[in-house]
Image: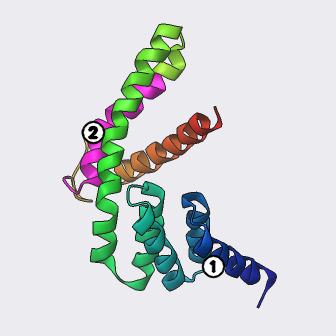
């Protein structure tokens, strides 16, 4: 077994004694990144049994189920994440008002755009209300796909910035 494999085994043993959401997520993600999808599913399911509201654990479980062909199960696992994304819009509306109050116009504009997307087209797309062929106002399929990718990239940046504070 490689050193990396030994590390995963040690991490797994440690988590048996002292479960921690962050470390459990890292273990499941490491299995996923290595293409060990059954192990990733097992690790993320165990973690979700202890931390059922953790969206990152749900995401890694859903991602791990897809390559195993368990698409319906993956969809059910990910539905609460989609609902959480919808609620996240309210955070960006609050940030918009906060930034406006601080005179940070550029940040306020970005937050307003994310709020608009999360409460409108992107949420509809994620919730399945707008299928892949459905059009957003003034947008074709490629624009719709790029919009979703861009929004998710910006969300990741905001998440990183908020966690670093």
Q: Is residue 36 above or below residue 109?
A: below
Kindly tell me whether residue 28 is visible in this rendering: yes
Q: Is residue 68 left or right of residue 35?
A: left
Determine which residue is flagged by label 2: 138
| Mark 1 residue element | loop
- Residue 94 percent location from the top left of the image: 39, 23
Magenta region: 109-129
How many residues crowd around disc 2 within 10 Å: few (fewer than 14), some, or many (20 or more)? few
Determine if the magenta segment contains residue 125: yes
Number of numbered discs? 2
Q: CA distance from mark 1 to mark 2?
A: 40 Å
- Quarter of the rendering containing residue 36: bottom right
Please state which of residues 120 and 16 is positioned toward the viewer in this rendering: 16
- Residue 96 percent location from the top left of the image: 43, 21
Please report the residue visible at 37 percent of the width from the left and 84 percent of the height from the top. 69
**What secondary structure prevails in the magenta region?**
helix
| Mark 2 residue element | loop
Q: Is residue 90 left or right of residue 47?
A: left
Please state which of residues 22 and 83 is positioned toward the viewer in this rendering: 22
Determine which residue is flagged by label 1: 34
Q: Is residue 164 above or below residue 68?
A: above
- Quarter of the rendering containing residue 24: bottom right
Kindly tell me whether residue 140 is visible in this rendering: no
């Amino acid at each position: 077994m490689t050193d990396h494999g030994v590390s995963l085994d040690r991490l797994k043993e440690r988590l048996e004694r002292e479960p921690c959401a962050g470390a459990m997520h890292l273990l499941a993600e490491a299995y996923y990144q290595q293409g060990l999808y059954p192990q990733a599913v097992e690790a993320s399911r165990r973690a979700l049994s202890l931390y059922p509201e953790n969206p990152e654990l749900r995401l890694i479980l859903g991602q791990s189920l897809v390559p195993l062909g368990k698409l319906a199960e993956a969809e059910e696992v990910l539905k609460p994440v989609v609902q959480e994304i919808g609620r996240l819009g309210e955070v960006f509306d609050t940030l918009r008002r906060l930034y406006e109050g601080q005179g940070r116009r550029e940040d306020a504009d970005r937050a307003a755009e994310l709020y608009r997307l999360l409460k409108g087209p992107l949420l509809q797309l994620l919730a399945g209300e707008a299928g892949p062929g459905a059009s957003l106002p003034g947008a074709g399929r490629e624009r719709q796909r790029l919009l979703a990718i861009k929004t998710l990239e910006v969300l990741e940046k905001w998440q990183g910035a908020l966690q670093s504070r």
